Image (cartoon, grey):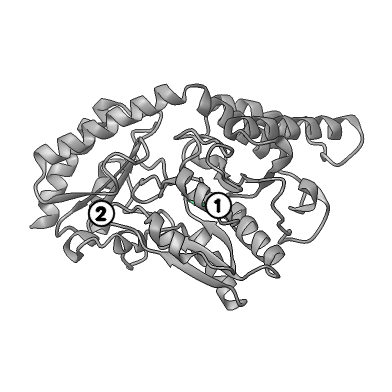
């Protein structure tokens, strides 16, 4: 890939070439509007429904429970606001966590201004929420729990099945932001009692600008955008046919070899961690040691400036991140690491490496060789 070593798959991925191939006709010859009744329109309706089936199959939902959106952020907005507005007669309390993506946190901030009351659960040093604190936070006004499946900055996987059970036992709906999880772990919305789930194609080798939202059939939610009746009247706007075809193909391919893919990424991750531990002193692994996404490693280098580290890595053709891509450039410390109680001397120098399909062990050696030198430079 043009001399670049890419270790930022949690920020975005390249489009798989088979995905791209499947998408291309829908930009040109198959350009019909899926709402039109003539054949090039009807054919596009058909491929959208096929993509819906592929998404439903992977998470064990029904095709009618899948809605296509413009991105993961939109899916989160539609789920949280849609449920909040439609359940507001029943209650105005929502429970989430301090380490959610801003698509959830800022949606909750907006709802606070509109009279909703939000509880932000703490996390422990590994980034896990406390199930007892969750149980205690539920009251008569609670309508929704929103906890991410896996954290984008540190990779920690939350106890989703247990959260789903608590939600069900208390008659509260459960949304989970699975944007990092889909393509990286198996999810079954029945077994895990998930009522609503977000995903985004560009995080699993699909195109940018298309997402999906699952909402259980029995869960009421209102639309947040007015217009035509597309997506069962929940998401107005002519469908992104090529994008939806790409999302469907990408999710299908991701889960075809998921065990093998996870094994490969876990091996790279463990090799990287062991090399860093062996060769660089004064480091701290952020996130849970075991309950974490296979390809995610977040390590803090004591007394190192993360921004400087990234620039020096970039000079060597290495793409990595200090945490959330959406935050880089901002001087504020990560809200995730802060919530996990990471000490000040370890806050600035965090480096998130997220492995993917094209990475090899040789890439990891190149990365560690450079890191060893660069961290030394940054510390002097
Ligand atoms: C990337 C990401 C999002 C946002 O998805 P977009 O498609 O970029 O809007 C939301 N939540 C998490 C956890 C993410 O990693």
Residue 275 % position (x, y) = 16, 35
Q: Sequence order check: which comes first, mark 2 or mark 1? A: 1
Q: Tell me which residue sits at (67%, 33%) in the image.
A: 245
Distance between mark 2 and mark 1 Cα atoms: 39 Å
* Pointers 2 and 1 in contact (C-beta within 8 Å): no
- Rendered image: mark on residue 350: 2
The C terminus lies in quadrant: bottom left
Q: Tell me which residue sits at (31%, 53%) in the image.
A: 322
Q: Secondary structure at mark 2?
A: strand
Q: Secondary structure at mark 1?
A: helix
Residue 312 % position (x, y) = 23, 50
Q: Tell me which residue sits at (30%, 40%) in the image.
A: 317
**Depth order, front residue of 220/369:** 220
Residue 28 % position (x, y) = 74, 33
Q: Nearer the viewer, mark 2 or mark 1?
A: 1
Vertical placement of residue 160 versus 171, above or below: above
Residue 47 % position (x, y) = 74, 30
Callout 1 crowding tier (Cα within 10 Å): few <14, some 14–19, many ≥20: few
Residue 369 appears in view = no
């Amino acid at each position: 890939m043009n001399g670049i070593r890419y270790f930022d798959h949690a920020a975005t991925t390249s489009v798989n070439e088979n995905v791209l191939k499947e998408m291309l006709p829908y930009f040109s010859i198959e350009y019909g509007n899926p709402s039109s009744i003539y054949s090039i329109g009807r054919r596009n309706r058909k491929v959208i429904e096929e993509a819906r089936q592929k998404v439903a199959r992977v998470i064990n939902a029904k095709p009618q429970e899948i809605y296509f959106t413009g991105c993961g952020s939109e899916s989160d907005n539609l789920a949280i606001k849609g449920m909040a507005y439609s359940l507001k007669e029943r209650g105005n309390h929502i429970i989430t966590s301090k380490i959610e993506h801003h698509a959830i946190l800022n949606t909750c901030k907006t709802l606070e201004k509109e009279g909703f009351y939000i509880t932000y659960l703490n996390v422990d040093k590994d980034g896990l929420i406390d199930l007892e604190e969750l149980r205690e936070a539920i009251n008569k006004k609670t309508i929704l729990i929103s906890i991410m499946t896996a954290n984008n900055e540190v990779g920690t996987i939350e106890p989703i099945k247990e959260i789903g059970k608590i939600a069900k036992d208390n008659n509260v709906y459960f949304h989970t932001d699975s944007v990092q999880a889909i393509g990286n772990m198996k999810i079954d919305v029945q077994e895990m009692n998930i009522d609503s789930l977000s995903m985004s194609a560009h995080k699993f080798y699909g195109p940018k600008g298309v997402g999906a939202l699952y909402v259980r059939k029995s869960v009421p939610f209102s639309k947040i955008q007015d217009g035509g009746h597309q997506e069962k009247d929940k998401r107005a706007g002519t469908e992104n046919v090529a994008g939806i075809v790409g999302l469907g193909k990408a999710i299908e391919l991701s889960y075809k070899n998921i065990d093998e893919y996870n094994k490969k990424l876990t091996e790279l991750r463990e090799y990287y961690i062991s090399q860093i531990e062996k060769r660089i002193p004064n480091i701290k692994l952020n996130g849970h040691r075991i309950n974490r996404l296979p390809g995610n490693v977040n390590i803090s280098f004591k007394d190192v400036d993360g921004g400087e580290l990234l620039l020096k890595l970039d000079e060597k053709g290495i793409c990595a991140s200090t945490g959330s891509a959406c935050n880089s450039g901002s001087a504020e410390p990560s809200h995730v690491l802060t919530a996990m109680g990471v000490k000040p001397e370890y806050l600035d120098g965090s480096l998130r490496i997220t492995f993917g399909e094209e990475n090899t062990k040789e890439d990891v050696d190149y990365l560690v060789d450079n890191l060893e030198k660069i961290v030394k430079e940054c510390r002097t």
